[in-house]
Amino acid sequence: MRFNFATIKLNRALILLLPLAVLSLVAFSCVTPSGGGGCGGPASQGWSGFASYNGTLYFGSMDGRVFAVDPSARNREVTFPGEGEWVFAIEAPAAPGSMCGPLGCAPASVAVNIYSTPAVTDNLVYVGTYYVKGGGAEGKVLAVSPSARGEGRVFPVRKENEWVYPHDKYEAAGAIVGDLALDESTIYIGSSDGKVYALDTIYGDLKWEFETGDKIWTSPVVKDGVVYVGNYEGKFYALSSQDGSLLWEIELPAAIASSPVVSGGSVFFGTFDHYLYAINSANGVEKWRFKGGNWFWANPVVKDGVVYAGCLDHRIYALGARTGTELWQFTADTPIVSTPVLADNLLIAVSKSGEMYVLEANGGALERTVSIGYSVMAPLYAEENMVYVHARNRCVCGVDVQSGEKVWELCYSDID
């Protein structure tokens, strides 16, 4: 089944080019502190969020490392790494060519970046990478064993089921920007080579792949045997999780900006033409669309019949999930790039400048603000009354949203 919104494609080419420019600026420009004052240091890449398992937080750093952090150890100000904590540096792939001078030649270096949030099972952490090699963006998927990484063993430890995909060290998939999606024995990856990959979680073998025709910089989502994913050509797909066969597709007037969220028979996502869409998860028929003042880049959050959506127009919108009717809106100081979170009856959002807003979820009233002190683009993560933040100054912190106190902070730029 295919739906083509051909009548609203006049500015499609321009809309498709805008995200490419934005990601280039994010990746390679200097980082400006929230207080202003020019460039705050060397360029930072990546904006990984957090995954949690058995009390441990896992995230990808901006310099290509995977961290396992125990919040209780951080509360006690234990020197990192404490018991159960570790850091794993992902080895950069060999770059073609070399740099030569009068004193000889040195191999060219390749920097590994981690944009996607890790996915975690009971014995493995899955990570997607992004690096530029030979003029193009490439990536790999790694399965990392917490026990082997805690012991500092040489990666990969086969007996611990560690692996890299593609298995051949000279091969790569496209660069991975979106998060990884886990479902039982399969992990699903959207790649900038335009393909969706389904890999076996234990061995990393390819189960199936599906070609969408253009870059995928958002995350696939799997629910009830269906994988939902959108690309930068404005196409949105529903695929069988078993074999990757196409169930339905639709074509939208602009690139898909945010990762989809599936709830109550609907799929919600934003596009670069300033709309937030709700489509029928069974057949792709549009239910409603809501227009903001800019792109909906942050992923929407859905709970109890309400869609909460952060927008680059500085606003956070609360919309009725069934109709798209606006319930309330709140205006922040700068664009909302980071995905908000819900904790009890509170909605917590952080602006690009690093101002955290704690709002009443029902009416949007401001409870308190917390200054993170630096730009934030990574998605937030909440557990009970704690919200965890990964800021662009290469620091992560835990914030008590009830008190507004920054309980702990770990800056990994000084960690070897």
Image: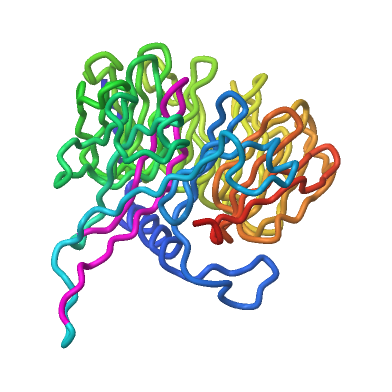
Is any atom of residue 5 visible in this view? no
User: Is 309 on the left-hand or right-hand side of 135?
Assistant: right
Q: Residue at x 38, y 45 (%)?
A: 177
Residue range of the region highlighted in magenta in the rendering? 104-133
Residue toward you, 33 or 270: 33
Residue 297 coordinates in the image, percent (x, y): 50, 46
- Image quadrant where residue 208 sits: top left
Residue 384 coordinates in the image, percent (x, y): 73, 28
Residue sitting at the far bottom: 102
Q: What quarter of the picture does the N terminus occupy?
A: top left
Residue toward you, 297 or 80: 80
Q: Residue at x 47, y 25 (%)?
A: 267
- Image quadrant where residue 345 sits: top right
Residue 109 belongs to magenta span:
yes
Residue 94 in the image: above or below residue 221: below
Residue 98 coordinates in the image, percent (x, y): 16, 70
Residue toward you, 306 or 80: 80
Is any atom of residue 266 visible in this view? yes
**Figure label count:** 0
Residue 12 coordinates in the image, percent (x, y): 33, 51
Q: Residue at x 82, y 45 (%)?
A: 404
Residue 323 belongs to magenta span:
no
User: Is 208 on the left-hand or right-hand side of 191?
Assistant: left
User: Is 194 on the left-hand or right-hand side of 171?
Assistant: right
